[in-house]
Image (spheres, grey):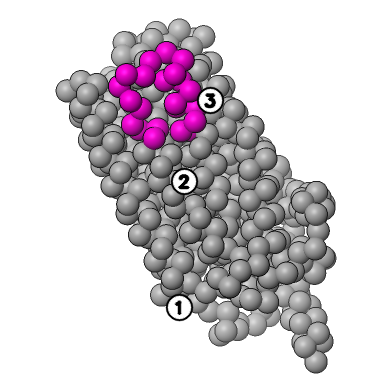
Amino acid sequence: MTDTATHVPEYKSDKLGWGVISAYGTPTVGIGYMYLLINLYIMKFSTDVLLIAPAVMGTIFGISRVWDAISDPLVGYLSDKTRHAMGRRRIWLLASIVPISLTFIMVFSPPEQLSGSWLIVWMAIGVIGFYSAMTLFMVPHMSLGAELTPNYHERSRLYGLRHASYTIGSIIALISMQLLINAEQRGEEAVRLTAFQLSLLAALISTGLIVYAVVKLRERPDFQGRIKQSPYGAFRDVWQNPHARLVLVVSFIEHIGSAVIGILTLYIAQYVVGRPALAPAIILTYMIPSTLSVPMWLPLSRKFGKIRLWMFSMMLTGLSFGGMFSLPFLEPEEMKVGAFFFFAFFAGLAAGCGGTIAPSIQSDIIDYDEYKTGERKEGSYFAAFNFVFKSASGVMIFVTGYVLQFSGFVPNQEQTMTVQVAMVTLYGLLPLVCYAIGTIMFSKFTLNEDEHARIRAELQKRALEKSS
């Protein structure tokens, strides 16, 4: 059975207008901005400006992921069970606004008088609080996307625009990161002031975008009250779903490889390539093809199938970052810079594909659960997918902090070859190995377009029988 279908009916009622798609994707501009600035700059801000040891920050991020083991499933399950006039998801989006804004400002605005243990406590509360608050938004928002249409390819269109919006926010964050890097040259006080102003502006804009989405979007009232399971039963169903189980394992392996990329990009630019000022341009080289390639992946997914396309994105990502391992050994410096840009471009193309296709496939898996259980557990499923992503990130932040510290890393100084090789091993070889394993495992995935069409037809038949 192939991943393409020859007899899948198209239902006009499943099509989404651009107004709905844009309203769904718009809030992720602010979310993408916040996530990138946290993921790319907070470690460097903490080690180079606040002078907190890398291992300490790694531990803080590790603890936040342990907490995610509780918060992600809880939010997913509770949003599935929510009964409200606004629906199951939008009320959670509203509730996320204040904690996201406050914790984002908090991590970039520690009081100057804080030092030592109290500064560490402040950053721990801010970091753990930020990722917890993001769960309040991310899990219900991803779940809402799966509910807006059951169409196999329309979901790719919806999540494709969401990915593009998220990446646009990330691109805007690069400007902020450049401002922060420039402020470093003027001293600690300038960095602190710039960080506060940027975080406050981001919080205000993100608030407006989330409110716009809540006002514009609508939810299906028939999905409320469709889950009868206990939390344990809901997540047991997730794990017992063979398609979900395979994707969870593949995603964890994949994210183990990709998580370190965001953590170490600034370090690679400064301490391996020797051109810290180029870091924003490198990341932009990654972000632009990630955004602009989305319209290309949509017709390709129809032609070659979502499964094959996601496998292709995994292979391309692994090869792109695998090439980064060569950076410390290239001479002269211009060759390092050229290779860095080259590999970043193709990694960005792969990211555009994965960001468009992966959540679309995850939504199809939720339809299979409805086929088996009769319930709609989008929150529980995306909580599981989100937890896998965040737990893999937490593991690698923890590992990276200790690898840097014990390889001999000294901030703001030229690094030894031992430190450089340790960095590119995490940054290049690890993603290559992880994505290769993930590609091989995902080749066993069988929920293709034909099978999804059969499931949707059966669900429609049941709905008609129930209403008659």
The alpha-carbon separation of the residues under discs 1 and 3 comes to 43 Å
Q: Assess disc 1: are there few (<14), some (14-19) or many (≥20) residues with their C-alpha within 10 Å of its C-alpha.
A: few
* Mark 2 vs mark 1: in front: 2
Residue type at numbered disc 3: Ile
The alpha-carbon separation of the residues under discs 2 and 1 comes to 31 Å
User: Which residue is at a point 81% across and 58% down the rendered structure image?
Assistant: 229
At which x and y percent is residue 236? 81, 50
Q: Which residue is mark 1?
A: 17
Residue 333 as seen in the image, left or right of residue 457:
left
Magenta residue check for 439: no
Residue type at numbered disc 2: Pro
Residue, far bottom: 468
Magenta residues, start to end: 106-127
At which x and y percent is residue 50? 35, 19
SS state under label 1? loop
Q: Which residue is mark 3?
A: 60
User: Which residue is at a point 32% across and 47% down the rendered structure image?
Assistant: 202
At which x and y percent is residue 275? 27, 24
The alpha-carbon separation of the residues under discs 2 and 3 comes to 19 Å
User: Which residue is at a point 44% across and 18% down the rendered structure image?
Assistant: 118
Q: Which mark is residue 99?
A: 2
Residue type at numbered disc 1: Gly
Q: Earlier in the sequence, mark 2 or mark 3?
A: 3
Dividing the picture into quadrants, the one containing residue 175 is top left
* Residue 257 appears in the rendering: no
Query: In which quadrant will I find the C terminus?
Result: bottom right
Residue, far left: 186
